[in-house]
Amino acid sequence: MANIGLYIELKNGAFKKANRELLSLAARGGHNVHAIVFCADARPYLEELKGVQVIVQVQGADLAYQPDRYAATLAAIIEEYKLDVFLGAFSAQGKDLFPRLAAKAKAGLVSDCLAVDLDKRQAVKPVYSGKLLAEYRVAGPRALFTVRPNVIPVEPPAAGGAPELKSRALDTGEPRTRIVEVIQSASQRVDLTEAEIIISGGRAMKAQENFAVLEDLARVLNAGVGASRAAVDAGFASSDMQVGQTGKVVNPKLYIACGISGAIQHFVGMKTSKVIVAVNKDPEAPIFKKADYGIVGDLFTVVPLLNEELKKALG
Ligand SMILES: Cc1cc2nc3c(=O)[nH]c(=O)nc-3n(C[C@H](O)[C@H](O)[C@H](O)COP(=O)(O)OP(=O)(O)OC[C@H]3O[C@@H](n4cnc5c(N)ncnc54)[C@H](O)[C@@H]3O)c2cc1C
């Protein structure tokens, strides 16, 4: 039985869905699971953290995310609780934090994992822009993995007694890097990396205001709105909406690509979507070779029709 640690990510105090996926992964195989939460009082998250054995709440005067302080604190916790494997989400924060933590904790790190075998400390991850899946094994005594959101199915929490609640002070050493400001996207209602449904627009959107047609459909489906790089470069969409090799890697249940040709650099960012629907007026567009369902037509006609029908169907 291994000692597993989980980095629990909170967004403005809210428990992120990716945490539930990590909990489901850690619960497999009867391991001793420790959840690390940076908050003054972790008790409001007890229900969410059902099934873990130990909760470590990290307390301090200023708990806003600061990479060096978080990494130093987590490295000390890994040492103190003798955690063999430490997991986090491959989120913007996970990407920033885990390499620093790996260096501090002198641990091996495999990032952007699609599957992790906790006993063998082995993981599968995409390489070469998703052209291959590679298997990595961490040989040292400590292994760190970041897991791509939306890959691990969420399972009901394992039954168990109340977790032990421990506290630890945040490291207050002088950080070498400091986050000065976090600019929240004004438009994004749903975090693309965690979204279950994404509707993306490409160059064919022609103007920023035309994204309203996708926003309308997104509201009906509670979806996130993404974009191709061509749409971002043309100023139709903000850069945080870009999906692809140089944008976000997403993994929704449903990805609807509107007026997107299907270039490889876009495809690698959404190819693991469970179902891909393409709307394109060119029947020869490469996206149709990759899509599960294709609609040949003008997106400005097709998307409002879809919207109308879905509204009726969903009541
Ligand atoms: C190093 C590098 C990194 C890159 N990274 C990314 C990345 O992260 N993400 C990304 O997306 N791209 C990326 N690209 C760019 C990529 O190669 C493509 O240029 C880009 O994805 C094309 O965007 P698009 O499909 O929106 O535009 P286009 O390729 O111009 O396609 C527009 C499509 O819209 C269709 N269309 C036009 N009007 C309509 C209409 N009214 N209704 C329906 N369909 C219509 C057309 O038939 C066409 O298929 C990268 C490129 C490089 C070199």
Image (cartoon, rainbow, N blue to C red):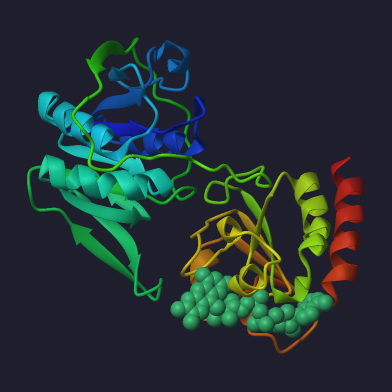
Q: Is residue 308 above or below residue 89?
A: below
Is residue 288 in view? no
- Residue 162: x and y, percent? 35, 10
Taking the spot 65% from the left edge, 52% from the top edge, the residue there is 197
- Residue 268: x and y, percent? 48, 71
233 on left or right of 245: right
- Residue 85: x and y, percent? 20, 39
Which of these two is toward me, 112 or 203?
A: 203
Which image quarter: residue 26?
A: top left
Taking the spot 57% from the left edge, 63% from the top edge, the residue there is 242
Give the tally of numbered discs.
Answer: 0
Taking the spot 40% from the left edge, 73% from the top edge, the residue there is 129
165 on left or right of 242: left
Which of these two is toward me, 138 or 246?
A: 246
41 on left or right of 76: right
Is residue 202 in view? yes
Q: Which corner quadrant holds the C terminus?
A: top right
Taking the spot 56% from the left edge, 64% from the top edge, the residue there is 243
* Quarter of the image where ligand 1 sits: bottom right
Which image quarter: residue 71?
A: top left
Extreme-bottom residue of the structure: 284
Q: Which corner quadrant holds the N terminus?
A: top left
Q: Is residue 135 above or below residue 40?
A: below
- Residue 290: x and y, percent? 60, 76
